[in-house]
Protein backbone atom coordinates (compact mmCIF):
# COMPACT_ATOMS: atom_id res chain seq x y z
CA UNK A 1 0.00 0.00 0.00
CA UNK A 2 1.18 3.55 -0.66
CA UNK A 3 -0.47 6.80 0.34
CA UNK A 4 -0.34 10.12 -1.48
CA UNK A 5 0.02 13.14 0.77
CA UNK A 6 -0.36 16.50 -0.94
CA UNK A 7 1.29 19.40 0.87
CA UNK A 8 3.95 17.09 2.34
CA UNK A 9 6.44 19.98 2.59
CA UNK A 10 3.92 21.78 4.79
CA UNK A 11 3.68 21.70 8.57
CA UNK A 12 0.96 19.07 8.98
CA UNK A 13 1.99 17.16 5.83
CA UNK A 14 5.53 16.73 7.13
CA UNK A 15 4.42 15.33 10.49
CA UNK A 16 1.78 13.06 8.99
CA UNK A 17 4.29 11.69 6.46
CA UNK A 18 6.76 11.00 9.24
CA UNK A 19 4.15 9.09 11.22
CA UNK A 20 3.07 6.96 8.25
CA UNK A 21 6.68 6.18 7.28
CA UNK A 22 7.27 4.97 10.84
CA UNK A 23 4.51 2.41 10.25
CA UNK A 24 6.60 1.18 7.31
CA UNK A 25 4.07 2.38 4.75
CA UNK A 26 5.29 4.01 1.54
CA UNK A 27 4.41 7.70 1.14
CA UNK A 28 4.35 9.66 -2.09
CA UNK A 29 4.51 13.35 -1.29
CA UNK A 30 3.69 16.32 -3.51
CA UNK A 31 4.00 20.07 -2.94
CA UNK A 32 4.73 23.15 -5.03
CA UNK A 33 7.01 24.56 -2.26
CA UNK A 34 5.57 28.05 -2.69
CA UNK A 35 7.00 31.05 -0.85
CA UNK A 36 3.98 31.91 1.33
CA UNK A 37 6.51 31.48 4.14
CA UNK A 38 10.24 30.74 4.35
CA UNK A 39 10.91 27.97 1.85
CA UNK A 40 13.97 26.86 3.82
CA UNK A 41 11.58 25.35 6.35
CA UNK A 42 9.72 23.48 3.58
CA UNK A 43 12.96 22.25 1.98
CA UNK A 44 14.34 21.12 5.34
CA UNK A 45 11.17 19.16 6.04
CA UNK A 46 11.48 17.38 2.69
CA UNK A 47 15.20 16.71 3.28
CA UNK A 48 14.33 15.11 6.62
CA UNK A 49 11.65 12.94 5.06
CA UNK A 50 13.89 11.88 2.18
CA UNK A 51 16.19 10.13 4.65
CA UNK A 52 13.60 7.37 4.57
CA UNK A 53 13.73 5.37 1.34
CA UNK A 54 10.00 4.75 1.52
CA UNK A 55 9.36 8.44 0.80
CA UNK A 56 9.22 9.75 -2.75
CA UNK A 57 8.70 13.44 -3.43
CA UNK A 58 7.41 15.28 -6.50
CA UNK A 59 7.44 19.05 -6.82
CA UNK A 60 4.11 19.61 -8.48
CA UNK A 61 1.39 22.25 -8.33
CA UNK A 62 -2.25 21.29 -7.85
CA UNK A 63 -3.00 22.94 -11.20
CA UNK A 64 -0.74 20.42 -13.01
CA UNK A 65 -3.43 17.84 -13.54
CA UNK A 66 -1.48 15.59 -15.93
CA UNK A 67 1.62 15.50 -13.78
CA UNK A 68 -0.42 14.67 -10.68
CA UNK A 69 -2.38 12.03 -12.51
CA UNK A 70 0.85 10.39 -13.73
CA UNK A 71 2.18 10.27 -10.17
CA UNK A 72 -0.99 8.53 -9.01
CA UNK A 73 -0.93 6.02 -11.86
CA UNK A 74 2.78 5.31 -11.54
CA UNK A 75 2.50 4.51 -7.83
CA UNK A 76 -0.93 2.84 -8.04
CA UNK A 77 -2.24 5.18 -5.35
CA UNK A 78 -5.50 4.19 -3.64
CA UNK A 79 -5.44 6.52 -0.62
CA UNK A 80 -5.02 10.29 -0.69
CA UNK A 81 -4.64 12.72 2.20
CA UNK A 82 -5.04 16.14 0.64
CA UNK A 83 -3.43 18.84 2.77
CA UNK A 84 -2.00 21.16 0.09
CA UNK A 85 -3.82 24.46 0.17
CA UNK A 86 -3.32 28.14 0.62
CA UNK A 87 -3.64 28.30 4.39
CA UNK A 88 -3.97 31.33 6.65
CA UNK A 89 -7.03 33.36 7.54
CA UNK A 90 -5.68 36.92 7.43
CA UNK A 91 -3.70 36.53 4.19
CA UNK A 92 -6.97 35.70 2.41
CA UNK A 93 -8.26 39.22 3.01
CA UNK A 94 -5.67 40.74 0.65
CA UNK A 95 -5.02 37.73 -1.57
CA UNK A 96 -8.31 35.93 -2.27
CA UNK A 97 -7.23 34.82 -5.75
CA UNK A 98 -4.45 32.60 -4.40
CA UNK A 99 -7.11 30.77 -2.42
CA UNK A 100 -9.34 30.46 -5.44
CA UNK A 101 -6.50 28.88 -7.45
CA UNK A 102 -5.17 26.41 -4.89
CA UNK A 103 -8.21 25.66 -2.78
CA UNK A 104 -10.97 25.63 -5.39
CA UNK A 105 -9.41 24.84 -8.79
CA UNK A 106 -6.73 22.75 -7.11
CA UNK A 107 -9.30 20.86 -5.07
CA UNK A 108 -11.38 20.22 -8.18
CA UNK A 109 -8.35 18.52 -9.76
CA UNK A 110 -7.94 16.34 -6.68
CA UNK A 111 -11.58 15.30 -6.87
CA UNK A 112 -11.36 14.49 -10.58
CA UNK A 113 -8.14 12.52 -10.17
CA UNK A 114 -9.68 10.62 -7.25
CA UNK A 115 -12.77 9.78 -9.29
CA UNK A 116 -10.87 8.66 -12.38
CA UNK A 117 -8.37 6.58 -10.43
CA UNK A 118 -11.06 5.01 -8.22
CA UNK A 119 -9.43 6.18 -5.01
CA UNK A 120 -10.59 4.12 -2.02
CA UNK A 121 -10.50 7.05 0.39
CA UNK A 122 -9.88 10.76 -0.04
CA UNK A 123 -9.25 12.58 3.23
CA UNK A 124 -9.05 16.35 2.88
CA UNK A 125 -8.22 19.21 5.23
CA UNK A 126 -10.98 21.55 6.26
CA UNK A 127 -10.91 23.98 9.17
CA UNK A 128 -12.65 25.13 12.33
CA UNK A 129 -13.05 28.46 10.49
CA UNK A 130 -16.06 27.00 8.67
CA UNK A 131 -18.07 27.50 11.89
CA UNK A 132 -17.74 31.30 11.75
CA UNK A 133 -18.66 33.26 14.89
CA UNK A 134 -21.19 31.57 17.14
CA UNK A 135 -21.93 31.30 20.84
CA UNK A 136 -23.07 27.72 20.46
CA UNK A 137 -20.01 25.96 21.92
CA UNK A 138 -18.47 23.42 21.77
CA UNK A 139 -18.60 23.26 17.99
CA UNK A 140 -20.18 20.09 16.69
CA UNK A 141 -20.00 18.71 13.15
CA UNK A 142 -23.78 19.14 12.90
CA UNK A 143 -23.69 22.90 13.60
CA UNK A 144 -24.32 25.49 10.89
CA UNK A 145 -21.35 26.26 8.66
CA UNK A 146 -22.94 28.52 6.08
CA UNK A 147 -21.73 31.90 7.28
CA UNK A 148 -17.96 31.96 6.64
CA UNK A 149 -16.21 35.14 7.80
CA UNK A 150 -13.31 34.99 5.33
CA UNK A 151 -12.69 33.77 1.80
CA UNK A 152 -10.31 31.16 3.25
CA UNK A 153 -13.19 29.69 5.27
CA UNK A 154 -15.44 29.95 2.21
CA UNK A 155 -13.01 27.88 0.11
CA UNK A 156 -12.81 25.19 2.78
CA UNK A 157 -16.59 25.06 3.17
CA UNK A 158 -16.77 24.80 -0.62
CA UNK A 159 -14.38 21.83 -0.51
CA UNK A 160 -16.78 20.08 1.84
CA UNK A 161 -19.78 20.56 -0.42
CA UNK A 162 -17.81 19.77 -3.59
CA UNK A 163 -16.61 16.52 -2.03
CA UNK A 164 -20.12 15.68 -0.90
CA UNK A 165 -21.38 15.90 -4.49
CA UNK A 166 -18.61 13.54 -5.69
CA UNK A 167 -19.49 11.08 -2.92
CA UNK A 168 -23.15 11.29 -3.87
CA UNK A 169 -22.86 10.97 -7.62
CA UNK A 170 -19.64 8.96 -8.12
CA UNK A 171 -19.62 7.13 -4.75
CA UNK A 172 -16.14 8.51 -4.05
CA UNK A 173 -15.40 7.85 -0.33
CA UNK A 174 -14.46 11.25 1.13
CA UNK A 175 -13.75 12.43 4.65
CA UNK A 176 -13.24 16.08 5.55
CA UNK A 177 -11.24 16.84 8.69
CA UNK A 178 -11.77 20.19 10.41
CA UNK A 179 -8.51 21.05 12.15
CA UNK A 180 -8.48 23.38 15.17
CA UNK A 181 -5.43 25.73 15.51
CA UNK A 182 -2.57 23.29 15.06
CA UNK A 183 0.81 23.99 16.70
CA UNK A 184 4.11 22.23 17.34
CA UNK A 185 7.71 21.84 16.19
CA UNK A 186 8.48 22.90 12.59
CA UNK A 187 5.27 24.91 12.75
CA UNK A 188 4.16 27.68 10.42
CA UNK A 189 5.89 31.07 10.70
CA UNK A 190 2.59 32.89 10.08
CA UNK A 191 0.93 31.41 13.18
CA UNK A 192 0.77 32.83 16.71
CA UNK A 193 3.20 30.47 18.44
CA UNK A 194 5.98 31.06 15.94
CA UNK A 195 5.37 34.80 15.66
CA UNK A 196 5.19 35.35 19.43
CA UNK A 197 8.34 33.30 20.07
CA UNK A 198 10.23 35.02 17.28
CA UNK A 199 9.23 38.50 18.45
CA UNK A 200 10.06 37.85 22.10
CA UNK A 201 13.51 36.55 21.13
CA UNK A 202 14.12 39.52 18.85
CA UNK A 203 12.87 41.92 21.51
CA UNK A 204 10.00 43.11 19.31
CA UNK A 205 6.46 43.64 20.55
CA UNK A 206 3.92 40.87 20.37
CA UNK A 207 0.71 41.94 18.68
CA UNK A 208 -2.32 40.63 20.54
CA UNK A 209 -5.49 40.97 18.55
CA UNK A 210 -8.77 41.37 20.40
CA UNK A 211 -6.60 42.32 23.41
CA UNK A 212 -5.61 38.66 23.82
CA UNK A 213 -9.19 37.59 24.52
CA UNK A 214 -9.46 35.19 21.59
CA UNK A 215 -10.25 31.69 22.78
CA UNK A 216 -8.56 28.97 20.71
CA UNK A 217 -8.72 25.21 20.82
CA UNK A 218 -4.94 24.84 20.37
CA UNK A 219 -4.23 21.30 19.19
CA UNK A 220 -0.79 19.72 19.28
CA UNK A 221 0.48 18.40 15.97
CA UNK A 222 0.90 14.78 17.15
CA UNK A 223 -2.76 14.67 18.17
CA UNK A 224 -3.83 16.02 14.77
CA UNK A 225 -1.68 13.45 13.01
CA UNK A 226 -3.01 10.60 15.18
CA UNK A 227 -6.55 11.72 14.36
CA UNK A 228 -5.94 11.79 10.61
CA UNK A 229 -4.04 8.50 10.65
CA UNK A 230 -6.84 6.72 12.51
CA UNK A 231 -9.27 7.71 9.75
CA UNK A 232 -7.32 6.52 6.70
CA UNK A 233 -8.67 2.99 6.74
CA UNK A 234 -12.02 4.10 8.14
CA UNK A 235 -13.70 5.09 4.92
CA UNK A 236 -17.34 6.02 5.08
CA UNK A 237 -19.48 3.09 3.95
CA UNK A 238 -22.89 4.80 3.85
CA UNK A 239 -24.89 5.05 0.62
CA UNK A 240 -23.33 8.50 0.23
CA UNK A 241 -19.81 7.66 1.40
CA UNK A 242 -19.02 11.03 2.94
CA UNK A 243 -18.11 12.13 6.43
CA UNK A 244 -16.83 15.13 8.41
CA UNK A 245 -14.87 15.12 11.67
CA UNK A 246 -13.55 17.78 14.01
CA UNK A 247 -9.96 17.16 15.04
CA UNK A 248 -9.21 19.35 18.02
CA UNK A 249 -8.09 19.26 21.60
CA UNK A 250 -11.45 20.03 23.19
CA UNK A 251 -9.99 22.36 25.82
CA UNK A 252 -9.71 25.97 24.59
CA UNK A 253 -7.35 28.55 26.06
CA UNK A 254 -7.20 32.34 25.89
CA UNK A 255 -4.50 33.74 23.62
CA UNK A 256 -3.09 35.69 26.58
CA UNK A 257 -2.68 32.45 28.55
CA UNK A 258 -0.95 30.87 25.54
CA UNK A 259 1.46 33.81 25.50
CA UNK A 260 2.16 33.37 29.23
CA UNK A 261 3.21 29.76 28.58
CA UNK A 262 5.57 30.94 25.84
CA UNK A 263 7.12 33.55 28.15
CA UNK A 264 7.53 30.96 30.92
CA UNK A 265 9.27 28.55 28.58
CA UNK A 266 11.54 31.20 27.10
CA UNK A 267 12.17 32.67 30.57
CA UNK A 268 11.59 36.11 29.04
CA UNK A 269 8.77 38.63 29.22
CA UNK A 270 7.10 40.03 26.15
CA UNK A 271 6.32 43.60 25.20
CA UNK A 272 2.62 43.42 24.43
CA UNK A 273 0.89 45.60 21.87
CA UNK A 274 -2.85 45.14 22.32
CA UNK A 275 -4.87 45.52 19.14
CA UNK A 276 -8.61 45.48 18.49
CA UNK A 277 -10.53 42.62 16.89
CA UNK A 278 -9.49 42.23 13.24
CA UNK A 279 -11.98 41.84 10.40
CA UNK A 280 -12.65 38.16 9.75
CA UNK A 281 -11.36 37.00 13.14
CA UNK A 282 -13.27 34.32 14.98
CA UNK A 283 -13.55 35.08 18.70
CA UNK A 284 -13.86 31.55 20.10
CA UNK A 285 -13.15 28.06 18.87
CA UNK A 286 -13.84 24.98 20.95
CA UNK A 287 -14.13 21.59 19.31
CA UNK A 288 -16.53 18.86 20.27
CA UNK A 289 -14.46 15.74 19.55
CA UNK A 290 -17.01 13.12 20.58
CA UNK A 291 -17.64 11.95 17.02
CA UNK A 292 -13.97 11.13 16.38
CA UNK A 293 -13.62 9.62 19.88
CA UNK A 294 -16.59 7.31 19.32
CA UNK A 295 -15.43 6.33 15.89
CA UNK A 296 -11.68 5.79 16.40
CA UNK A 297 -10.94 6.07 20.13
CA UNK A 298 -9.18 9.41 19.50
CA UNK A 299 -7.80 10.99 22.67
CA UNK A 300 -5.64 14.11 22.55
CA UNK A 301 -2.51 13.54 24.64
CA UNK A 302 -0.59 16.82 24.71
CA UNK A 303 -1.59 19.88 26.73
CA UNK A 304 -0.30 23.39 25.88
CA UNK A 305 2.28 23.32 28.65
CA UNK A 306 4.11 20.37 27.13
CA UNK A 307 3.29 21.29 23.52
CA UNK A 308 4.71 24.80 23.78
CA UNK A 309 7.84 23.49 25.50
CA UNK A 310 8.41 21.06 22.62
CA UNK A 311 7.98 23.86 20.08
CA UNK A 312 10.41 26.12 21.90
CA UNK A 313 12.99 23.34 22.24
CA UNK A 314 12.78 22.81 18.48
CA UNK A 315 12.86 26.56 17.71
CA UNK A 316 15.99 27.12 19.79
CA UNK A 317 17.80 24.22 18.22
CA UNK A 318 16.74 25.05 14.65
CA UNK A 319 17.74 28.71 14.90
CA UNK A 320 20.75 28.10 17.11
CA UNK A 321 19.52 30.18 20.04
CA UNK A 322 21.22 29.71 23.39
N1 LIG B 1 -2.25 24.59 10.72
C1 LIG B 1 -3.49 24.82 11.11
O1 LIG B 1 -3.74 25.30 12.23
C2 LIG B 1 -4.65 24.47 10.22
C3 LIG B 1 -5.95 24.65 10.72
C4 LIG B 1 -7.03 24.32 9.91
C5 LIG B 1 -6.84 23.81 8.64
N2 LIG B 1 -5.56 23.67 8.17
C6 LIG B 1 -5.41 23.11 6.82
O2 LIG B 1 -4.52 22.01 6.88
C7 LIG B 1 -3.76 21.91 5.68
C8 LIG B 1 -2.28 21.90 6.00
O3 LIG B 1 -1.96 23.11 6.70
P1 LIG B 1 -0.50 23.47 7.21
O4 LIG B 1 -0.67 24.19 8.50
O5 LIG B 1 0.36 22.27 7.15
O6 LIG B 1 -0.09 24.55 6.11
P2 LIG B 1 1.24 24.67 5.23
O7 LIG B 1 1.10 25.97 4.50
O8 LIG B 1 2.43 24.48 6.08
O9 LIG B 1 1.11 23.46 4.23
C9 LIG B 1 0.42 23.51 3.00
C10 LIG B 1 1.38 23.08 1.90
O10 LIG B 1 0.65 23.10 0.66
C11 LIG B 1 1.51 23.60 -0.35
N3 LIG B 1 0.68 24.18 -1.40
C12 LIG B 1 -0.09 25.30 -1.32
N4 LIG B 1 -0.69 25.55 -2.50
C13 LIG B 1 -0.30 24.56 -3.36
C14 LIG B 1 -0.57 24.27 -4.73
N5 LIG B 1 -1.32 25.04 -5.45
N6 LIG B 1 0.02 23.18 -5.26
C15 LIG B 1 0.81 22.36 -4.53
N7 LIG B 1 1.13 22.60 -3.24
C16 LIG B 1 0.56 23.68 -2.65
C17 LIG B 1 2.39 24.62 0.33
O11 LIG B 1 3.63 24.82 -0.33
C18 LIG B 1 2.57 24.03 1.74
O12 LIG B 1 3.79 23.32 1.85
C19 LIG B 1 -4.20 23.09 4.81
O13 LIG B 1 -5.20 22.63 3.93
C20 LIG B 1 -4.79 24.07 5.82
O14 LIG B 1 -5.74 24.92 5.23
C21 LIG B 1 -4.48 23.98 8.94
Image (tube, rainbow, N blue to C red):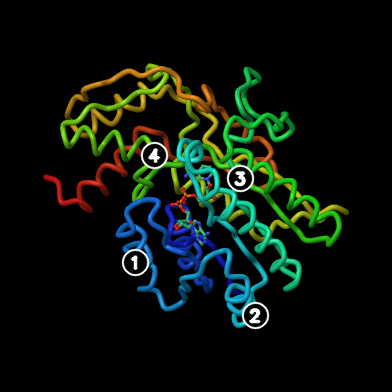
In this view of the protein, can residue 207 be seen by the observer? yes
- Element marked by disc 3: strand
- Element marked by disc 4: loop
**Residue assigned mark 2:** 73
CA distance for labels 4 and 2: 36 Å
| Mark 3 sits near ligand 1, with its Cβ under 8 Å away | yes
Depth check, front residue: 93 or 246: 93
Marker disc for residue 48: 1
CA distance for labels 4 and 3: 17 Å
Q: Residue at image x 74%, y 33%?
A: 142
Label 3 or label 1, whichever lies nearer to me, is 3
**Residue assigned mark 4:** 191
| Mark 4 sits near ligand 1, with its Cβ under 8 Å away | yes
Q: Earlier in the sequence, mark 4 or mark 1?
A: 1
Q: Position of residue 103 (x, y in %)?
A: 59, 52
Q: How many numbered marks have been drawn onto this rendered protein structure? A: 4
Q: Residue at image x 36%, y 27%?
A: 258
Marker disc for residue 25: none
CA distance for labels 3 and 2: 26 Å
Q: Going by the image, does 258 lie left or right of 85? A: left
CA distance for labels 4 and 1: 22 Å
Marks 3 and 1 close (CB-CB < 8 Å): no
CA distance for labels 3 and 1: 26 Å
Amino acid sequence: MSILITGSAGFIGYHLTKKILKKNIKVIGTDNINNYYDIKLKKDRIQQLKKNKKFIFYKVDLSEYKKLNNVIKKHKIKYIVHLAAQAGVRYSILNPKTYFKSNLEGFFNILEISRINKIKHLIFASTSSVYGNTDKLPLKETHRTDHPLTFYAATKKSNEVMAHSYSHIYKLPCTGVRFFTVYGPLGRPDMALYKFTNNIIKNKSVELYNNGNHLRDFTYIDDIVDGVFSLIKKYPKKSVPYDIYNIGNGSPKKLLEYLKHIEKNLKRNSKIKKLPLQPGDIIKTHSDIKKLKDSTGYKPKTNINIGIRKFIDWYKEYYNIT
